Image (spheres, grey):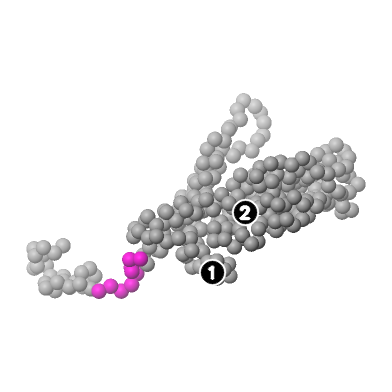
Amino acid sequence: MSLGVRYYTGEINVGDTAELFAALRERDKVVEQNEISSIEFTIQRPNGIVENPVTGSIEDDGQGYLQYTHTEEVGMYLAQAQFTLFNGEVRSVMVNFDVVDPFVTENSLERILAENVWFRLEDAFDSIEGGPALRDYTLAHFDLSKIEKYIPETLLDINVQMPLTEVGIGTFVNKNRNEPNPVMPLMAKGVLCKVIMHLIRSYVEQPVPQGAQIAYEDRTRYAQAWQIVYKSEHEDYISMVRLYKRGYLNLGHSALLVSSKAGRLFFSGSILRSRNIGRGFY
């Protein structure tokens, strides 16, 4: 059985040529050129449109190759390289890539935060080829731009917790990527919790095949698994919010001790006079 060798082309600037390479591995070696009949690349644009398959070339080392030039749209491109071998076997591998606008999205506060959230999720592995299913499947519908849509909801969540505040994204994210913001992890954690809830919802309607003696990948437990992750992440997030809000109450610093005529100190005083217990102090 031939397995796909996973490639991730990475980020391509809008309008540049994307050089797509793909290869098949059989046991401990790459399938050679003389075993491959042809290769076709099928590419889905960020807007969901799937282009007609394009025939690529076979390199001397057995790799498939395609120069793809239709990169006018910003976002994730899902590219499938399908090999046809001379023995009739057909196998494919994904060679996805991102197209970015270096003058717009890359340096926006929302994009910087979305990238910080995405790196916490992108290494969740479970796909046919043994790679991250989130990158192969989820990004077809849930990409960085959709993560950005949860930022206003997270800001509202933080601002309405006591004491009330009116902070914006600029409080948590610096325009200059090289200048770390000490409270950015709080915002990233909040958006991450919103994203995890989205993933939980996406797994609610997973079917369970019945009545057949077959082997299949049962993903119906994913909702429960993500709920466990969410519980841990959300508890950590709430703790971070409370610590952050303490700064608005000037808590965590020395405070003035208040005393009464009875010689009692509030609230950490060491002198207690029980004979004045009936004087209205509790």
Q: Which residue is mark 1?
A: 180
N-terminal label among 1 and 2 = 2
Relative to the observer, which residue lies in front, 245 or 173?
Answer: 173
For this orientation, the residue located farthest to the top is 211
Q: Which mark is residue 6?
A: none
**In the image, residue 271 lies at what x, y percent?**
17, 73
Q: Amino acid at mark 1?
A: Pro
Question: Up-down: is 146 above or below 258?
Answer: above
**In the image, residue 146 lies at what x, y percent?**
56, 49
Residue 164 placement: quadrant? bottom left
Question: Up-down: is 277 above or below 130?
Answer: below
Q: Main secondary structure of the magenta part?
A: loop
For this orientation, the residue located farthest to the right is 34
**In the image, residue 149 lies at what x, y percent?**
52, 50
Q: Is residue 247 left or right of residue 172?
A: left
Residue at 37% over, 60% down: 165
Q: Which residue is mark 2?
A: 123
Q: Which span is picked out in magenta?
A: 248-256
**In the image, residue 153 lies at what x, y percent?**
46, 51
249 is within the stretch colored magenta:
yes
Are there few (<14), some (14-19), or many (20+) residues within 10 Å of tag 2? Answer: few
Relative to the observer, which residue lies in front, 233 or 162?
Answer: 162
Q: Quadrant of the N terminus?
A: top right
